[in-house]
Image (cartoon, rainbow, N blue to C red):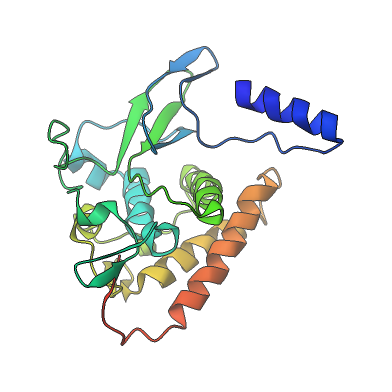
Amino acid sequence: HIVQDLTSDMGTELGLTVKNSAYKRSGYSFAGEDFNRTAGHHENYLSVIPPVSGAADRERHPLHRALSSYLATRGVWAGAGLVADNRFLLTQKQSSISFIGANKITVEGNKPAYLIHAGQNGFTQVEVRLGDGNMSDWAIMTKHAFTSFVLRLIEHGEFPARLFVVSGQADRILHDSARLKHIPTEQGYMHPAKHQRLIAEECIELTRSHDSIPAEEIEAAYEVATVCRQIESMDHSLEGASL
């Protein structure tokens, strides 16, 4: 709220219209609920995705399977990138943190890719813990806006089951930092960029039946679809690229 007030005041002084939307929130309240549980580069969103008891229940729940599937391949366009081990990595943390399991005691050990904090009034807090922060303004803004859009897709039950990553594989893909190779989905093996492009196209399709989706989320969906087409057109016979 403080940042929103400041930007609004700045916009008034400069005679500009400032978009008053913030997807990254640290310590905020909504509808009387206190969601003061954020840290570092973690992303936080309000959602109606219910909390579940553990990894096994998450694998059986279609809303959680959809979110896990999306996060498993998001790094193909949202990653920070670095050169390590004689190859280029699109994201940093996948090479150093295991996302299999939920042992949060170890510094670089097992941690879930996301957490759901229970609230009231039907809302929960989705805390995405990939931490793929970087110095690209485009990647930072796009990943927040597009992830918010994907959550809408999931909440409306429009995330297609054919795009689910095969049960038990989403966290493993995050952990293994696999090369840009085909991944197993319910529709068969596909490239991570194609997987993200198809998700973006499903989001765009949702705009045909829902006219209240924020403009920045729609713009992000089109940009993700475009950049993923560009990635798909690359020569993937080249060695060294990794998620």
Q: Is residue 236 left or right of residue 155?
A: left
Q: Is residue 195 above or below residue 71?
A: below
Q: Is residue 189 above or below residue 98?
A: below
Image quadrant of residue 61? top left
The percent coordinates of residue 124 (x first, y second) are: 42, 27
Tell me how many marks there are: 0
Determine the residue located farthest toward the top in the rendered image.
Answer: 32
Q: Is residue 129 left or right of residue 202?
A: left
The percent coordinates of residue 152 (x first, y second) are: 53, 44
Evaluate whether residue 55 shows in this view.
yes
> Residue at 57% of width from left, 70% of height from top?
226
Figure quadrant of the N terminus: top right
Observer-nearest of 158 and 89: 89
> Residue at 19% of width from left, 48% of height from top?
97
Observer-nearest of 204 and 7: 7
> Residue at 19% of width from left, 52% of height from top?
96
Observer-nearest of 5 and 197: 5
Figure quadrant of the C terminus: bottom left
The percent coordinates of residue 150 (x first, y second) are: 49, 50
Evaluate whether residue 206 shows in this view.
no
Image quadrant of residue 131? top left
The percent coordinates of residue 148 (x first, y second) are: 52, 44
Q: Is residue 70 above or below residue 60?
A: below
